Image: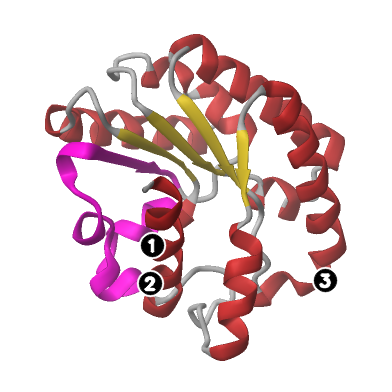
């Protein structure tokens, strides 16, 4: 087992132990990569940090920077201690594609992850966010588009829903910069758009 996986598994366990006591049975579970992890940090999200825009007792956000669908297949055992959420929102795929994994490979790992989540939380509604285009990876635009279209077909087969956050962020980016200087992660303006999008879809 590699060092990255072990380190991030410990981080996930600590986060769950720290926050599991806050949630009720009727809560939303957010699972994903750095877009969810950095949502907790003011230096990225500014005033739009996660628990400023979502109630702590109704929402649990478990983001781990740099992770993929394959990584999260390995974290399913850690999630088994959680009460069953009402809705599960997943933001993954970005790192998978930008590590040059093939679309078929990522879709296969995505399917394994979704089936694993369904086995753990059979009554929960599952929502996948499609892959957002970022300034640092504009050359991946076609690959991301093909993946997002395939993800929509896969989700239909698995009985889950895809939310098109990519279009919303792309439209907002034309009006105001939504990304940090690294061209990958959201800044405060990006998290404001991201937060509104999710709040609207969850309501």
Say how many tags the image has.
3
**Distance (Cα) linking label 1 and label 3:** 26 Å
Q: Residue furthest front?
A: 203
Residue 59 at x, y = what percent? 26, 40
Q: Using the image as rendered, state which of residue 189 and residue 4 is in the foreground.
A: 189
Secondary-structure class at tag 3:
helix
Instruction: Report the magenta residues as a range.
Output: 36-64
Residue 160 occupies quadrant: top right
Secondary-structure class at tag 2:
helix
Q: Using the image as rendered, state which of residue 185 and residue 125 is in the foreground.
A: 125
Secondary-structure class at tag 1:
helix
Residue 78 at x, y = what percent? 38, 20
Q: Is residue 37 left or right of residue 172?
A: left
**Distance (Cα) linking label 2 and label 1:** 5 Å
Q: Residue at x 41, y 56 (%)?
A: 200
Q: Are marks 2 and 1 in contact (CB under 8 Å)?
A: yes
Residue receiving disc 3? 139
Disc 1 or disc 3, which is closer to the eye? 1
Q: Where is 111 relative to 42, above or below?
A: above
Q: Residue at x 46, y 74 (%)?
A: 190
Residue receiving disc 1? 195
Q: Earlier in the sequence, mark 1 or mark 3?
A: 3
Q: Are marks 3 and 2 in contact (CB under 8 Å)?
A: no
């Amino acid at each position: 087992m590699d060092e990255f996986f072990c380190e991030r598994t410990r981080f996930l366990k600590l986060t769950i132990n720290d926050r599991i006591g806050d949630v009720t049975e009727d809560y939303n579970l957010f699972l994903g990569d750095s877009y969810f992890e950095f949502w907790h940090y003011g230096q990225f999200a500014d005033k739009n940090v996660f628990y400023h825009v979502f109630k702590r007792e109704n929402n649990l956000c478990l983001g781990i920077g740099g992770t993929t669908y394959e990584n999260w297949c390995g974290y399913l055992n850690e999630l088994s201690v959680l009460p069953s959420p009402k809705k599960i929102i997943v933001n993954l795929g970005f790192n998978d594609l930008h590590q040059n994994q093939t679309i078929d490979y990522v879709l296969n790992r995505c399917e394994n992850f979704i089936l694993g989540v369904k086995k753990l939380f059979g009554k929960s509604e599952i929502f996948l966010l499609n892959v957002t285009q970022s300034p640092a990876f504009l050359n991946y635009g076609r690959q991301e588009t093909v993946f997002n279209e395939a993800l929509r077909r896969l989700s239909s087969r698995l009985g889950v829903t895809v939310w098109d956050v990519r279009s919303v962020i792309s439209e907002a980016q034309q009006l105001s910069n939504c990304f940090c200087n690294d061209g990958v992660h959201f800044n405060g303006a990006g998290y404001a758009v991201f937060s509104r999008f999710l709040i609207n879809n969850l309501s």
